[in-house]
Amino acid sequence: LSPVCLGSLRRAASINAEYMGKLRITKKPTEFRRFYDRGDLPLQVSFSGATRKVAWKVDIEKLDYHHYLPIFFDGLRETQEPYKFLALQGVKDLLTEGGQKILPVVPQLIIPIKTALNTRDPEIRS
C-alpha cells in the first residue's frame, strides 16, 4: 500500500476508535445506578480499615425481593465503582439470605440476566 493509503487507513481507524469510545461512554445507565444515585436503595459502602463492605440500612429479610432483586441483577452490568461492587455484593447477600423469597422472583430475573449477557463485554459476562 502507498503511504497515502496507509495514512487514510490510520485516520479512519482513529476516527472509528474515537466513535466507539463515545458509544461506550454514552451507554444507557442501569436501573441499579439510577436507584442508587437517587438514594432509593437500602445500602451503602462501609469502609472498615482497608476493606470495603456493604452496610444494609434495613434487615435483608424485610426487603421486597420482587422489587429489589431484579434491580440488583441489572446492576451486574455496571463496570464502574462503587456500583459494580455494590451490585455484586448485594446480589450475593440477597441470594444468601433470601430463602423462600427467591424462587417466585426468578421469572423477573430473566431480562436483566439476558441484557447483561448481550452486552458482549467479557468483564460483565464473567
Image: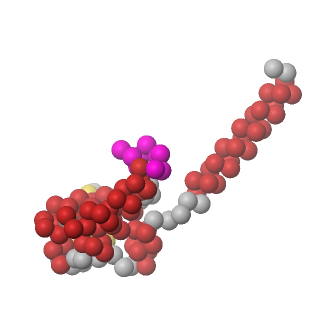
Between residue 105 and residue 72, name the one nearer to us. Answer: 105
Specify start and end residues of the magenta stretch as a single range: 118-126
- The residue at the point 32 percent across, 62 percent down is 109
Residue 115 position in % (x across, y down): 43, 56
Task: Examine the image and state in which quarter residue 56 appears.
Answer: bottom left
Q: Is residue 78 visible?
A: yes
Residue 25 position in % (x across, y down): 58, 57
- Determine whether 94 is above or below 6 in the image: below
Q: Is residue 95 left or right of residue 29?
A: left
Task: Examine the image and state in which quarter residue 99 appears.
Answer: bottom left
- Determine whether 53 is above or below 19 in the image: below
Q: Is residue 29 left or right of residue 107?
A: right
**The C terminus sits in image quarter:** top left
- The residue at the point 83 percent across, 27 percent down is 5
Q: Is residue 12 left or right of residue 46?
A: right
Task: Examine the image and state in which quarter residue 111 appears.
Answer: bottom left
Residue 103 position in % (x across, y down): 19, 64
- The residue at the point 24 percent across, 72 percent down is 65
Between residue 119 and residue 50, name the one nearer to us. Answer: 119
- Determine whether 5 is above or below 100 in the image: above
**The N terminus sits in image quarter:** top right
- The residue at the point 85 percent across, 21 percent down is 2
Between residue 114 and residue 88, name the one nearer to us. Answer: 114
Residue 112 position in % (x across, y down): 38, 60
